[in-house]
Amino acid sequence: MAKQPRAEQTRTTIIEAAAQMFDRQGFGSTSLSDIVTRGGITKGALYFHFVSKDELARAVIARQHQRSADAAERLLSRNLPGLETVLRAPFVLAEQVLTDPVARAGVRLTLEGGTLRNPVGGPFEEWTGVLAEQLRQGVRELDVRPAVDPDACARFVLSSFTGVHLAARALESPGQLPARLQEMWEVLIPGLAQPRRCAHHRDLAARLTDRLARSAAVAGVPAVPPPGPSLLPSPATAGAAAGSGPA
């Protein structure tokens, strides 16, 4: 009876060691020997649980996917307004990738899917479906502009998050991610939200940015100070500015 918990603990150790190496070096540059060394396990133990590096990578993705799905379920259980849920979702994902090596590795492996025999797209498809349904709810609640295409916008929001995450990681530093997310929403909110609701959602984005920066700091990721509460003028200010210029 004691063997099953021990076997599951060994499997978890292997997955976490693999996640740390895949996160650090990528799929192609990580060997099974690297994972064995990182996890302090034997090759026999690794091969007992996983027959190949490809299978192990899929186990990391599956674990990241489950954590992501659990986070989505917790967010949806709050029964928040639709647009607020959409706005919060990238911050939920960002907190995972900033604080959890398994989440970072799972995202990286998914994006490097061409190195796997059968690329994995399930997590992105599921999040897209969640965001699209929340945008439809936002239209019904009169928070989202009625002309918005929920499916196209959901794909764009998720793609935008992926882009700012990759850029912060590859070109700047992970600690830039909170500030870059706020910038992302400063650009997207005016095109999504009814004008009367833009200020409310900008303020929410600023507060979520601050909270994400604090979570990153606790996890040992020094965050860059976020921008001010609004990088773009309000609709009224923009209209006044436009009216004062040449026709």
Image (tube, helix red, strand yellow):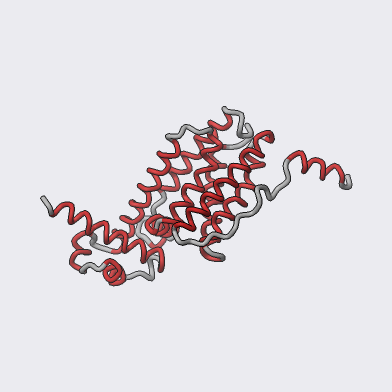
Q: Which residue does the image show at 47% across and 47% down from the upper left?
A: 92
Q: Is residue 233 above or below residue 144?
A: below
Q: Which residue does the image show at 22% across and 59% down from the upper left?
A: 10
Whether residue 98 sits left or right of residue 8 in the image: it is right
Where residue 225 sits: x, y (%)? 60, 58
Where residue 214 sits: x, y (%)? 51, 53
Where residue 88 sits: x, y (%)? 52, 43
Whether residue 68 sits left or right of residue 135 in the image: it is left
Q: Is residue 176 above or below residue 43?
A: above
Looking at the picture, tell me which residue is in the foreground, 18 or 150: 18
Residue 227 lies in what quarter of the image? Answer: bottom right
Q: Is residue 155 above or below residue 79?
A: below
Where residue 36 sits: x, y (%)? 26, 69
Whether residue 135 sits left or right of residue 187 in the image: it is left
Q: Which residue does the image show at 40% across and 55% down from the upper left?
A: 103
Residue furthest out toward the right: 246
Looking at the picture, tell me which residue is in the foreground, 53 or 11: 11
Looking at the picture, tell me which residue is in the foreground, 154 or 66: 66
Looking at the picture, tell me which residue is in the foreground, 163 or 7: 7
Q: The C terminus appears in which quarter of the rendering?
A: top right
Q: How many marks?
A: 0
Residue 207 lies in what quarter of the image? Answer: top right
Whether residue 75 sits left or right of residue 32 in the image: it is right
